[in-house]
Image (cartoon, rainbow, N blue to C red):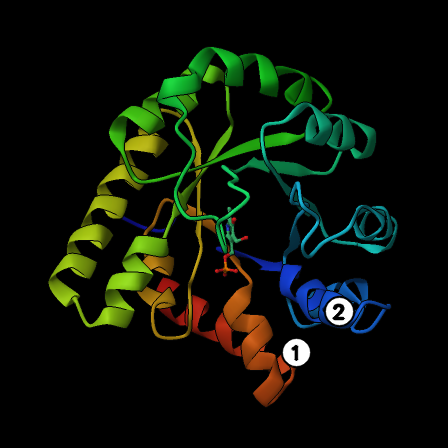
Amino acid sequence: MEPLGKLRLGVNIDHVATVRNARGGVYPDPVRAAKLAEEAGADGITAHLREDRRHIADADIDALMEALSVPLNFEMAATGEMQEIALRHKPHAVCIVPEKREERTTEGGLEVAREENRLAHFIAPLRDAGCRVSIFIAADRPQIEAAARIGAQVIELHTGAYCDFHAEGAFDQRDAELARMSDMAAYAHELGLEVHAGHGLTYDTVKPVAALPQVMELNIGHFLIGESIFRGLGPAIAEMRRLMDEARA
Ligand code: PXP
């Protein structure tokens, strides 16, 4: 199958804020990183305002909404507080993610099937406000079906397990996970959902995911911010873009 369209790159700038917050103060500035990412070819900027504000702060979202020329993908937990913030800003997209206070990063996908009713009511006002609603889930058929039923326009497939298997050298499991993502991307597309993917992607793992024809957007953060220490943020993003384009060609 031919790819459905150009693959967009969303650059997640959360960990610029992590470095800033390690010392307090204002340096390095996530908004400056976002503007640089735009110049380097990012199609969108992603930021996750966590309940504990461990990286991105409320003022960063205000500043990003003000400064960006590309769309903001606002990652948020399904809480009343976050819904209120999203409705105030009306970003281009919201991505609903699970959030546990004790986790180091977003560890699993959202359990949409278990919370279908609540989530349907939760996302309705966000959709009505014009935000594209994305749901971050594992590549599981019941979760995808539930995401379609609650009225989400987009699902983001969690690539964390695939990347972890790769890092551990568990290549059979990695390939099985990739095959599952491939099948589920096709299934989600059949149900009318736009498919995105992300979490943990690196130069070593991005190409097979970028090659999935139904996947329209990748959201990548931690690796790019880390790699920017060695080659600068612009070149780090440009190399990711090159690998994505190569996989897609
Ligand atoms: N997509 C979602 C929904 C996420 O929660 C995250 C992490 O915040 C990412 C993508 C990016 O993951 P990483 O920082 O590991 O590239």
Q: Residue at x 30, y 62 (%)?
A: 164
Percent from the top left, x then y, of residue 133? 58, 30
Task: Kindly report which numbered mark, 2 or 1, lies closer to the viewer in this rendering.
Answer: 2
Where disc 2 sits, the SS reads helix
Q: Residue at x 75, y 69 (%)?
A: 20
Q: Is residue 230 above or below residue 149?
A: below
Q: Residue at x 38, y 62 (%)?
A: 248
Percent from the top left, x then y, of residue 67? 86, 55
Identify the residue at the far front of this view: 102
Percent from the top left, x then y, of residue 149? 41, 15
Is 114 on the left-hand or right-hand side of 87?
Answer: left
User: Which residue matches tag 1?
Assistant: 234
Instruction: Mark yes or no: residue 237 visible.
Output: no
Percent from the top left, x then y, of residue 138? 34, 40
Going from N to C along the chain, the mark reached first, 2 or 1, is 2
Q: Residue at x 28, y 24 (%)?
A: 142
Q: Residue 87: name its quadrant.
A: top right
Query: Toward the viewer: 143 or 101?
Result: 101
On residue 208, the disc is none
On residue 20, the disc is 2
Disc 2 crowd, CA 10 A, few/some/many (<14, 14-19, 20+): some
Q: Is residue 203 above or below residue 130?
A: below
Mark 1 is on which residue type? Gly
Q: Is mark 2 within 8 Å of ligand 1?
A: no
Where disc 1 sits, the SS reads helix
Q: Is residue 152 above or below residue 118?
A: below
Is 154 on the left-hand or right-hand side of 246?
Answer: right
Mark 2 is on which residue type? Arg
Q: Residue 201: name its quadrant.
A: bottom left
Identify the residue at the far left of this view: 172
